[in-house]
């Protein structure tokens, strides 16, 4: 069974969306195995958004693709400078107010949570996703204001990332092992059979 890390960012906390966001995960049948509110330390956020070549290129390429699709000129050419600027903004943003960290467990939890979260840019994230339903921020506006997208939430991108990120935000004793009704109703092959 997979586990994945979610952070409700300062905009989600400030806008009173903690309950709504967590409900989405409960409703789909995921099990919450860890949860806390934290005022993030600089080194935790630094580690969480590691400034790798791959990350800077991905951030640059995704934003440029959106500008291209809208027939607009992307005003940046250097992916390192662009990525570095986004990262600095993200670190400050994530430390600007408390955030909520949680670990969710379930079958294919990593991709399931990414599906529920939606696309990086809220305005182009489909209705029904967390980012699409609760925000409408755009690359254009966030770039114009030199700040990170206010997209409410972070979710791990793959299983390895999830493991690394869980270790940043939680210690082993904070990860709870307990029986949840969904362990039977969703996953126990014998659940509906008579004893
Ligand atoms: P995601 O959170 O969808 O996995 P990334 O890992 O690519 O997205 O980026 C991390 C975070 O950095 C995003 O959630 C968003 O808050 C911010 N961000 C990424 N790209 C941009 C951008 N081009 N402009 C402003 N903020 C960005």
Image (cartoon, rainbow, N blue to C red):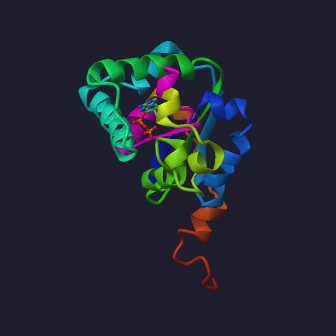
- Which span is picked out in magenta? 143-166
Q: In this view, does 90 lie above or below 5?
A: above
In percent of width and height, residue 120 lies at 46, 41
Q: Which residue is drawn at 33% across and 36% down?
A: 64
Of the pair 190 and 126, the residue shown nearer to us: 126
Of the pair 79 and 71, the residue shown nearer to us: 71
* Residue 170 seen: no
Furthest-bottom residue in view? 194
Quadrant where the C terminus lies?
A: bottom right
Q: In which quarter of the image is residue 174?
A: top right
In percent of width and height, residue 35 lies at 62, 37
Residue 15 in the magenta stretch? The answer is no
Q: Is residue 37 above or below residue 109?
A: above
Disc tally is 0
In percent of width and height, residue 163 lies at 40, 38
* Residue 187 seen: yes
User: Is 81 positioned to the left or the right of 135 in the image?
Assistant: left
Q: In which quarter of the image is residue 134?
A: top right
Quadrant where the N terminus lies?
A: bottom left
Q: In this view, does 174 lie above or below 2?
A: above
Residue 163 in the magenta stretch? The answer is yes
User: Is 187 positioned to the left or the right of 59 in the image?
Assistant: right
In percent of width and height, residue 139 lies at 47, 34
Q: Residue at x 35, y 26 (%)?
A: 75
Quadrant where ligand 1 appears: top left
Q: Quadrant of residue 54?
A: top left
Furthest-top residue in view? 42
Q: Which residue is drawn at 50% across and 51% down?
A: 113
Q: In this view, does 112 lie above or below 35?
A: below
């Amino acid at each position: 069974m997979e586990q994945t890390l979610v952070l409700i960012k300062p905009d989600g906390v400030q806008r009173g969306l903690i309950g709504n966001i967590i409900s989405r995960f409960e409703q789909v049948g995921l099990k919450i195995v860890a949860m806390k509110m934290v005022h993030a330390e600089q080194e935790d956020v630094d580690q969480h958004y590691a400034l790798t070549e791959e990350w800077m290129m991905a951030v640059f390429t995704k934003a440029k693709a959106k500008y291209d699709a809208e027939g607009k000129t992307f005003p940046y050419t250097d992916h390192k400078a662009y990525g570095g600027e986004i990262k600095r903004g993200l670190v400050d943003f994530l430390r600007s107010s408390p955030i909520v960290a949680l670990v969710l467990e379930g079958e294919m939890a990593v991709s399931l949570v990414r599906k529920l979260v939606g696309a990086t840019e809220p305005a182009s994230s489909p209705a029904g996703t967390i980012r699409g339903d609760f925000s409408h921020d755009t690359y254009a506006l966030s770039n114009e204001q030199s700040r990170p997208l206010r997209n409410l939430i972070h979710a791990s991108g793959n299983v390895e990332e999830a493991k690394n990120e869980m270790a940043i935000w939680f210690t082993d004793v904070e990860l709870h092992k307990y029986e949840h009704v969904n362990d039977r109703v969703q996953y126990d092959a014998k659940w509906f059979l008579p004893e």
